[in-house]
């Protein structure tokens, strides 16, 4: 015998929320904040890029000049948008994987994790993932999350492996990203 359960749209929504809450083991949030950009570093990088564009244009390598120019334009728009409308980051450690905002990284796609914790300068969770599109790493700001509890929760599913901060990560922090 089969029974049909009739629910209103509101009841379905509430049930979905309850199921969502049940699978969350640990959750933290980092509110989007406007960080002051380091104008000196940005100026030096801009001058270096302009110099390279001029050099490539003079030497006849127009493709390289165009690529550097496009890279500068994209970087400029990205910095402007990121500081104009900072968005919060919500991270949920679930039974099936790590969810960052709407993106879910299943545990089978995560090789290891490391927590960089040097308050107030550097506080982030770094996931080493199998996906090539992310560059191999997903960086998640910790905000006010308890790093000890976060570590204990993640160790149930994935291994911890020390990571070194890359040059691009250090440069992004110096610039103010």
Image (cartoon, helix red, strand yellow):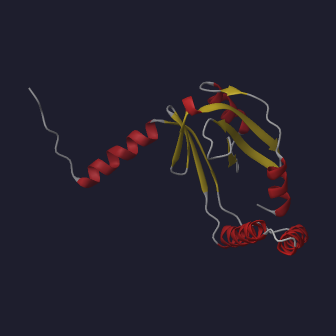
Q: Looking at the image, which is closer to me, 30 or 136?
A: 136
Quadrant (top left, top right, bottom left, bottom right) of the N terminus: top left
Q: Residue furthest left?
A: 1
User: Residue 146, image x and y in percent?
Assistant: 70, 40
Quadrant (top left, top right, bottom left, bottom right) of the C terminus: bottom right
109 to 63, vertically: above or below: above
Quadrant position of residue 125: top right
Quadrant position of residue 172: bottom right
87 to 99, vertically: above or below: below
Q: Residue at left 83%, top 63%?
A: 175
**In the picture provided, is 61 more to the left or to the right than 29?**
right
Q: Residue furthest front?
A: 60
User: Residue 159, image x and y in percent?
Assistant: 68, 25
**In the picture provided, is 62 more to the left or to the right than 96?**
right
150 to 11, vertically: above or below: above
Q: How many marks?
A: 0
Q: Residue at left 88%, top 71%?
A: 55
Q: Looking at the image, which is closer to me, 27 or 71?
A: 71
Q: Looking at the image, which is closer to me, 90 or 15?
A: 90
**In the picture provided, is 8 more to the left or to the right than 96?**
left
User: Residue 133, image x and y in percent?
Assistant: 61, 46
Q: Residue at left 72%, top 38%?
A: 147
């Amino acid at each position: 015998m089969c029974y049909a359960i009739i629910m209103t749209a509101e009841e379905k929504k509430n049930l979905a929320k309850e199921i969502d809450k049940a699978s969350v083991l640990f959750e933290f949030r980092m509110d989007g904040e406007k960080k002051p950009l380091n104008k000196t570093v940005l100026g030096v990088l801009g001058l270096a890029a302009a110099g390279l564009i001029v050099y490539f244009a003079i030497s006849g390598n127009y493709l390289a000049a165009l690529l550097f120019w496009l890279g500068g334009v994209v970087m400029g728009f990205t910095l402007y948008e990121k500081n104009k409308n900072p968005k919060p980051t919500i991270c949920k450690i679930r039974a099936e994987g790590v969810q960052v905002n709407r993106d879910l990284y299943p545990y089978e796609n995560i090789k290891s994790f490391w927590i960089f914790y040097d308050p107030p300068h550097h506080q982030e969770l770094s996931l080493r993932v199998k996906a090539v599109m992310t560059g191999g790493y997903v960086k998640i700001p910790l905000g006010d999350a308890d790093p000890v509890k976060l570590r204990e929760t993640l160790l149930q599913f994935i291994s911890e492996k020390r990571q070194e901060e890359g040059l691009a990560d250090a440069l992004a922090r110096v610039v103010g990203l």
